[in-house]
């Protein structure tokens, strides 16, 4: 059975747990590739309080006929150009395009506490 969404936990070292809901309809191939790599241990970086990113090479490019470039605050997206999973701390543009994945549903207040870099483990909830 194909699930319409997945809830994932981001266990951020010395910060806490952030929960995101990732929707299949946004980017089904990207989501399938990401879920197949879970649990994922990596480093989360803070890019000047504009966005957070996790290094993760999913080996996939832009998905869909219409390129997405806008990411809203609290949304997650995969940025194929940089091989990042991005969490937007404010509305932003990722060029040339990104694959939107979902949004933060719990622990959004913890996002601003992320230092320059920190260990993170992403796993299914």
Image (cartoon, rainbow, N blue to C red):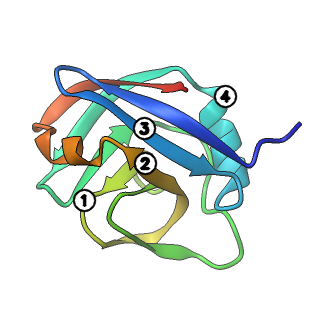
Q: Earlier in the sequence, mark 1 or mark 3?
A: 3
Numbered label attached to residue 89:
1
Report crowding for label 3: few under 14, some 14 to 19, many 20 or more residues within 10 A (C-alpha): many
Residue on which the image places disc 3: 19
Residue on which the image places disc 4: 36
Report crowding for label 2: few under 14, some 14 to 19, many 20 or more residues within 10 A (C-alpha): some
Q: Earlier in the sequence, mark 3 or mark 4?
A: 3
Whether residue 29 is visible here, answered yes or no, is yes
Foreground tag (2 vs 4): 2
Image x and y of residue 11, in percent: 34, 24
Evaluate if marks 1 and 3 touch, with contact meaning CB atoms under 8 Å apart: no
Please indicate whether residue 85 sits to the left or right of residue 90 in the image: right
Evaluate if marks 2 and 3 touch, with contact meaning CB atoms under 8 Å apart: yes
Evaluate if marks 1 and 4 touch, with contact meaning CB atoms under 8 Å apart: no
Mark 1 → mark 4, Cα distance in angstroms: 26 Å
What is the secondary structure assignment of the residue under circle 3?
A: strand
Mark 2 → mark 4, Cα distance in angstroms: 22 Å
Residue on which the image places disc 2: 105
Q: Earlier in the sequence, mark 2 or mark 3?
A: 3
Image x and y of residue 89, in percent: 25, 59
Q: Earlier in the sequence, mark 1 or mark 4?
A: 4
Foreground tag (3 vs 4): 3
What is the secondary structure assignment of the residue under circle 1?
A: loop
Report crowding for label 4: few under 14, some 14 to 19, many 20 or more residues within 10 A (C-alpha): few
Whether residue 85 is visible here, answered yes or no, is no
Residue at (53%, 46%) from the top-left corner? 21
Of residue 98 and residue 72, the one placed in the foreground of this image is 72
- Classify the position of the C terminus by image quarter: top right
């Amino acid at each position: 059975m194909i699930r319409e969404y997945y809830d994932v936990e981001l266990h951020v070292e010395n910060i806490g747990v952030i929960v995101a809901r990732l929707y299949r309809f946004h980017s089904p191939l990207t989501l399938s590739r990401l879920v197949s790599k879970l649990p994922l241990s990596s480093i989360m970086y803070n890019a000047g309080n504009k966005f957070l990113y996790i290094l993760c090479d999913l080996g996939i490019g832009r998905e869909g006929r219409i390129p997405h470039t806008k990411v809203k605050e609290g949304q997650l997206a995969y940025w194929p150009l940089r091989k990042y999973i991005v969490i937007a701390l404010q509305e932003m543009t990722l060029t040339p395009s990104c694959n939107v994945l979902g949004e933060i549903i719990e622990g959004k207040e913890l996002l601003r506490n992320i230092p320059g870099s920190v260990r993170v483990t992403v796993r299914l909830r």
